[in-house]
Amino acid sequence: MITQQLKDQATRDPMAFGMTYITLPNNIKWEYRQWLPEIYNSINPYNIQNGTDRCRKATIIKSTQSGLTTAGLVKTLHMMAEFDLNVAYSLPRDQDVIDLVRAKLNPIVRNSPYIQGLLGNVDAVKMKQIGSSFLYFMSMTTEPRMLSADAIMNDEIDLSDPNNLATMPNRMDDSDWKLTLNYSTPTIKGYGVDALYAKSCQYEWMVKCPHCGLQQVLDWGRNIEIKGMKLNPDEARYVCRKCRGTMTVEDFAKGEWVAQVPDLVNFHKGYHISQMMFYDPFDLYLHSVDPNSSVQEFYRKRLGVPYSSGNTDINYDWLMDNAVYDDAELDEGRLYIGVDQANTISIVIIMVKGDSIEVVFAEEFENDGWLELDRLLNKHRFSGGVIDADPNRNTATNISKNTDGLIKIADYHTRIKALYKVTRDEEKKVEHVTIRRSQAFDNLMEKIKEGNIYVSSEEGRVPDWARLLFTHIGNLRRDVEENNTALGTEQKITWRHVGPDHLAHALLYALIASFEGGKNQFHVRYSGRKDSDKKDKKKLKKGKGRSVRIR
């Protein structure tokens, strides 16, 4: 029987709400883990309303099997049923939305009489009414629009489109609540959930050694000890990193959340969950050496730790040391332009002569970007160019049409075999290039490493525009996703960004245009350089012994 005391507790505490009113699917029992209540109580409307908690944003970097998706759904239903909040819930793909709703949420609603009684007239896969509140499920394959929310739940953010995900907070512009919960297994360091966690108070589960009393955060390399053969060990146990005494999951249950950056507790709470907190050490160790799995999968999904074996070593500092040359301006060559569009218009111009590619212009325009592009197209004699097709597809199409296909519109696609593919619409006089994104960025980075793509300094000084370009290129991270199949491990290359990267895309588009060659195969002089006396210039960087070839 649900007493008034239980009802009051359910209003105050999302976890109590779940245990009182919600029946989990597939006969799953409510499992109390000592580290869960704090997470359930994060961004709790009751605590915010009565002033005991001021934090309205939380990020959880998690392992699998930690119960966080269930927690997210329970917190969502608590907000709706007890506080009449509208909630927007995001997932990476449409299929993820369908799977979550059909396999988890619908059984919860169907098997929980209290929630079933609150179900309103709207009961679809992507929208549900609970009481007077609405729950919107959204795929991050498209930008969220046309809805208002008081709270947003972003599930598996590392697999979501970061540009669409970045617009989710806009859905709360008209709300006084503005509650945000982000949670995901991590991918690479500095990206997605790891980047958000780094900006939070960074709660870690601190455990105490029962032997020497050392307080410590669990670490796979320092808190596990194995006896016997690697693939067939006699024993695997958790140990204290100091005294090497045995520690157990029961010892870990006595731990506590400790903020690594306590000044941010009232602004952004972050939690890190590892399977070491609740998993048997022997079983977890076997996962780490499973030949059908990978080190990457173990660290990301079992330990909740970002990991990648595929990162490029090209960053801002590397580019400043290796991609800048003095007295290396091409006297003439073929000009190509690349344009990326988003909230800004990013333009890169390259001059090509032989296998030397000098970047001569890189700018990002917040205002009047299209006018600047028109000015550049009228000023310079380009051999070709590529412009991002979206989001302003009509504008990009008209530019291609007005230049008789000299400037091609571009889309990324994974289902082509070549690096890129060009097609032409004879009726509209528009040329379209489809680019295999990951392989194209691999090609771009390889050319930068080989010294073929570079910037020439101006009187020994690196131009400000080049520094901005290097920042955008340095924000890219190469990741290798590994998936186990019946035929073995399948690897998929993915390039992610940890900050603005629009100029990097514009450079890639310009490079693709140069591969295609273009319509105008004439050499020109670039008239956008500042006048300078080349005789006074000295070599700025040698790029680890490489020279720029000018033919």
Image (cartoon, rainbow, N blue to C red):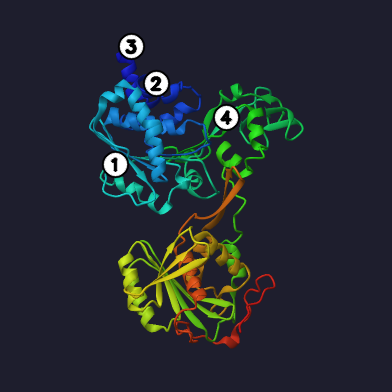
Residue located beneath label 3 in the image? 1
Q: Which of the 4 image quadrants contains residue 2?
A: top left
Q: Spatial distance from mark 3 to mark 4, Cα to Cα?
A: 34 Å
Q: Is 450 placed above or below 19 here?
A: below
Which structural element holds mark 3? Answer: loop
User: In this view of the protein, can residue 304 be seen by the observer?
Assistant: no
Residue type of the residue flagged with mark 3? Met
Q: Quadrant of the C terminus?
A: bottom right
Q: Earlier in the sequence, mark 3 or mark 4?
A: 3
Q: Which of the 4 image quadrants contains residue 401?
A: bottom left
Residue located beneath label 1 in the image? 149
Q: Earlier in the sequence, mark 1 or mark 3?
A: 3
Q: Spatial distance from mark 1 to mark 3, Cα to Cα?
A: 34 Å
Nearer the observer: mark 4 or 2; the answer is 2
Image coordinates of residue 15 in percent, x first then y, are: 40, 25
Q: Is 492 placed above or below 317 here?
A: above
Residue located beneath label 2 in the image? 19
Determine crowd level at label 1: few under 14, some 14-19, many 20+ residues with C-alpha closer than 10 A: many
Instruction: Pick out the residue farthest to the right.
Output: 228
